[in-house]
């Protein structure tokens, strides 16, 4: 498989949280890449992902889909700061956070909460759906706030894949009335988000 002298492509819409995760990791590691801004189920995406979802990636002859696989490749194939620590315990904690976000927190915070504001079925916010999920939103944000309280990061004392994986979600949550109020009231989470927002990788990928 030939990937030498080929420029990496991250393919997907800039507003996608998981496209942004891959871009943040690439930016943090100093990887030169091109963003190919296309939507799910476009021809470029369908050619790589069997269900037309984003992000997908191309690097020479290599094509990958799913953000975890893409980030794993970026971490293993390129130099630059480690996004997954070498220490096995810290690495496991990063993977634990990534799995929790991908399987559970994304569903609560984005699919059930943020999208009730951004993509309501009949034009206005889906108030019933929002009210039903708010207790879980509060629990999810409280869990993140507790984790970042010590030093502003989810794992250890530096920016890792765990942080990169939650930044895009929290950026959207912060734009909602209830989510924004919860974040504002949490000194630890507000401070951590301010620290993340100041990173060039986060600023450069903000949709």
Image (tube, rainbow, N blue to C red):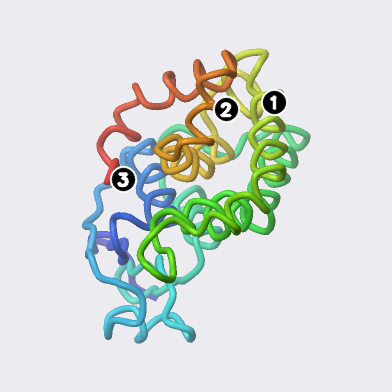
Q: Residue at x 35, y 75 (%)?
A: 40
Q: Residue at x 60, y 57 (%)?
A: 128
Between the C-alphas of marks 1 and 3, the distance is 29 Å
Question: Which is in the foreground here, disc 3 or disc 2?
Answer: 2
The residue at which mark 3 appears reads as 31
Q: Residues within 10 Å of mark 1 (few under 14, many from 20)?
A: some
Between the C-alphas of marks 2 and 1, the distance is 15 Å
Task: Give the quadrant of the N terminus.
Answer: bottom left
Describe the element under mark 3 as helix, strand or loop.
Answer: loop
The residue at which mark 1 appears reads as 147
Between the C-alphas of marks 3 and 2, the distance is 35 Å
The reply to whether the C-beta atoms of the residues labelled 1 and 3 are less than 8 Å apart is: no
Residue 4 quadrant: bottom left
Horizontal placement of 161 versus 61: left or right? right
Question: Which is in the foreground here, disc 2 or disc 1?
Answer: 2
Q: Nearer the viewer, residue 45 or 89?
A: 45
Task: Tell me which numbered mark, 2 or 1, is placed earlier along the sequence.
Answer: 1
Q: Nearer the viewer, residue 125 or 142?
A: 125
The residue at which mark 2 appears reads as 182
Image location of residue 33, percent across then percent down: 25, 53
Question: Which is in the foreground here, disc 1 or disc 3?
Answer: 1
Task: Tell me which numbered mark, 1 or 3, is placed earlier along the sequence.
Answer: 3
């Amino acid at each position: 498989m030939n990937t030498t002298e080929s420029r990496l492509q991250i393919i997907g819409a800039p507003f996608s949280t998981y496209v942004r995760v891959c871009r943040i990791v690439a930016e943090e590691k100093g990887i030169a890449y091109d963003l190919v801004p296309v939507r799910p189920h476009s021809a470029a995406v369908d050619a790589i992902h069997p269900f037309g979802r984003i992000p997908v990636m191309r690097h020479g002859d290599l094509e990958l889909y799913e953000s975890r696989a893409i980030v794993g490749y970026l971490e293993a194939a390129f130099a630059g700061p480690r996004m997954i620590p070498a220490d096995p315990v810290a690495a496991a904690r990063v993977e634990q956070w990534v799995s929790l976000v991908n399987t559970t927190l994304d569903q609560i915070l984005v699919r059930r909460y943020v999208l009730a504001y951004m993509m309501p079925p009949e034009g206005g916010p889906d108030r019933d759906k929002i009210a039903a999920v708010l207790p879980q939103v509060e629990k999810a944000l409280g869990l993140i706030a507790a984790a970042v309280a010590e030093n502003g990061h989810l794992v250890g004392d530096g920016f890792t894949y765990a942080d990169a994986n939650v930044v895009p979600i929290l950026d959207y949550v912060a734009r909602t009335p209830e989510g924004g109020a919860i974040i504002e009231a949490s000194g630890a989470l507000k401070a951590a988000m301010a620290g993340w927002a100041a990173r060039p990788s986060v600023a450069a990928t903000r949709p």
